[in-house]
Amino acid sequence: MNYALCINKEEGVNTLYGKLKEYRLLITFSTVSEALKSERKLDHKGYVFEPIPTPLGLSAGCGLSICLPREEEKAVQELLNEGICIAGVYEVQNSGFISLNISKNDLN
């Protein structure tokens, strides 16, 4: 995995809202349809997750993201294996978002 720190100076620590304060893995999508398909698949498989608006500092093309507990990282692999197009996966930290450059091969 490759890591890159994405710090949004405008947002900072005070903008971690809702489940981002608790769940520290964020998945962004290019389209709303991919986000909604992901919600259905994750719900069907029993994953713990929360759909949230995409944080302002992250450009993804879609205003809907999914946050999950960090322990649920295997959900990303399952979405990729099922053909879901993911725009980005981030570890949420108080100082910003760390981009996790994940591919199917990284998670096997």
Image (cartoon, rainbow, N blue to C red):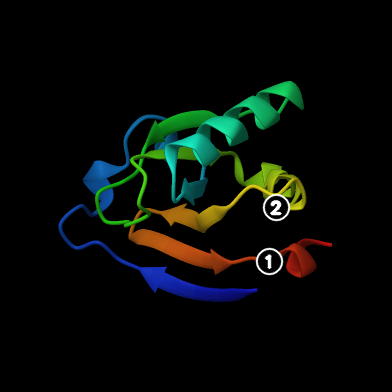
Give the class, few, some or many, for how many residues have Cα within 10 Å of label 2's Cα (few <14, many ≥20). Answer: some
Under tag 1, what secondary structure?
A: loop
Residue that badge 1 annotates: 103
Residue 80, numbered label: 2
In the image, what residue type sits under mark 2? Answer: Leu
Q: Position of residue 88 (x, y in %)?
A: 50, 58
75, 62: nearer the viewer: 62
Q: Is residue 62 above or below residue 45?
A: below
Q: Is residue 103 left or right of residue 24?
A: right
Task: Say which residue appears at 77% left-offset and 27% top-offset.
Answer: 45
Task: Say which residue appears at 69% left-offset and 42% top-offset.
Answer: 72
Q: Quadrant of the N terminus?
A: bottom right
Task: Say which residue appears at 44% left-offset and 51% top-offset.
Answer: 30
Q: Is residue 53 above or below residue 108?
A: above
**Mark 1 touching mark 2, by CB under 8 A?**
yes
Q: Quadrant of the C terminus?
A: bottom right
